[in-house]
Image (cartoon, rainbow, N blue to C red):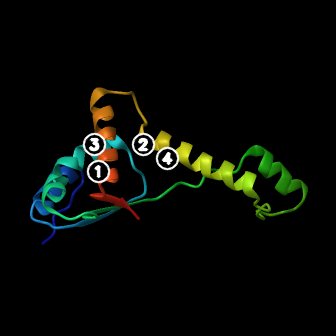
């Protein structure tokens, strides 16, 4: 029988720890990623860091699609574009990529800065660089 994890009486951090301490790999798929949340579960992943091969922790993070700007909405209404895509050139693609990176950066570091958050970011970056955590 599976246990319900609701973070009021049963915590994800504890459920992960009990399951992952004997695992060789894990795939994690989240719609939202915040370093403080990662910091809560990182201890559960320690055995994978120590004993497993590169890529033992695979992370897939969903990205929210930003709302259209007021300018985009006005142009669509004026020209009856009904959500049509603009022609994408290098400048537009670069702007969209930078906006996505900025959005992810804000998502990652949301909240007041702290020493624990800074340490978690450094640890996460080290995990990515070493290949223990891979993004998919």
In the visual, does 24 lie left or right of 105?
A: left
Q: Earlier in the sequence, mark 2 or mark 1?
A: 2
Which of discs 1 and 4 lies nearer the camera? The answer is 1
Q: Which mark is residue 46?
A: none
Q: CA distance from mark 4 to mark 2?
A: 6 Å
Q: How many marks?
A: 4
In the rendered image, residue 21, in percent from the top left (x then y), is placed at 10, 59
Residue at the disc numbered 4: 104
Residue under the image location 33 percent in, 32 percent down:
118
Residue 8 in view of the camera: no
Q: CA distance from mark 2 to mark 1?
A: 15 Å
In the rendered image, residue 35, in percent from the top left (x then y), is placed at 35, 42
Q: Are marks 3 and 1 in contact (CB under 8 Å)?
A: yes
Which of discs 3 and 2 lies nearer the camera? The answer is 3
Rendering quarter of residue 6: bottom left
> Helix, strand, or loop for circle 1?
helix
Which of discs 2 and 1 lies nearer the camera? The answer is 1
> Helix, strand, or loop for circle 4?
helix
Q: CA distance from mark 1 to mark 4?
A: 18 Å
In the visual, does 76 lie left or right of 65?
A: right
Q: Are marks 4 and 2 in contact (CB under 8 Å)?
A: yes
Residue at the disc numbered 3: 123
Rendering quarter of residue 90: bottom right
In the visual, does 127 lie left or right of 96?
A: left
Q: CA distance from mark 3 to mark 2?
A: 14 Å
Residue under the image location 32 percent in, 39 percent down:
122
Which quarter of the rendering shows the N terminus? bottom left
In the rendered image, residue 101, in percent from the top left (x then y), is placed at 54, 47
Asked whether 99 or 31 is in front, the reply is 99
Q: Earlier in the sequence, mark 3 or mark 2?
A: 2
């Amino acid at each position: 029988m599976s246990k319900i994890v609701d973070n009021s009486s049963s915590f994800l951090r504890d459920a992960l720890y009990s399951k992952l301490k004997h695992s060789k790999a894990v795939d994690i798929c989240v719609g939202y990623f915040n370093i403080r949340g990662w910091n809560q579960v990182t201890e559960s992943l320690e055995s994978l860091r120590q004993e497993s091969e590169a890529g033992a922790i695979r992370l897939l993070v969903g990205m929210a699609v930003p709302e259209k700007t007021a300018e985009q909405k006005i142009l669509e209404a004026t020209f009856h574009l009904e959500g049509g895509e603009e022609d994408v050139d290098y400048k537009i693609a670069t702007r969209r990529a930078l906006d996505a990176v900025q959005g992810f950066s804000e998502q990652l570091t949301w909240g007041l800065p702290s020493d624990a958050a800074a340490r978690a970011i450094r640890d996460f970056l080290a995990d990515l660089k070493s290949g223990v955590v891979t993004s998919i």
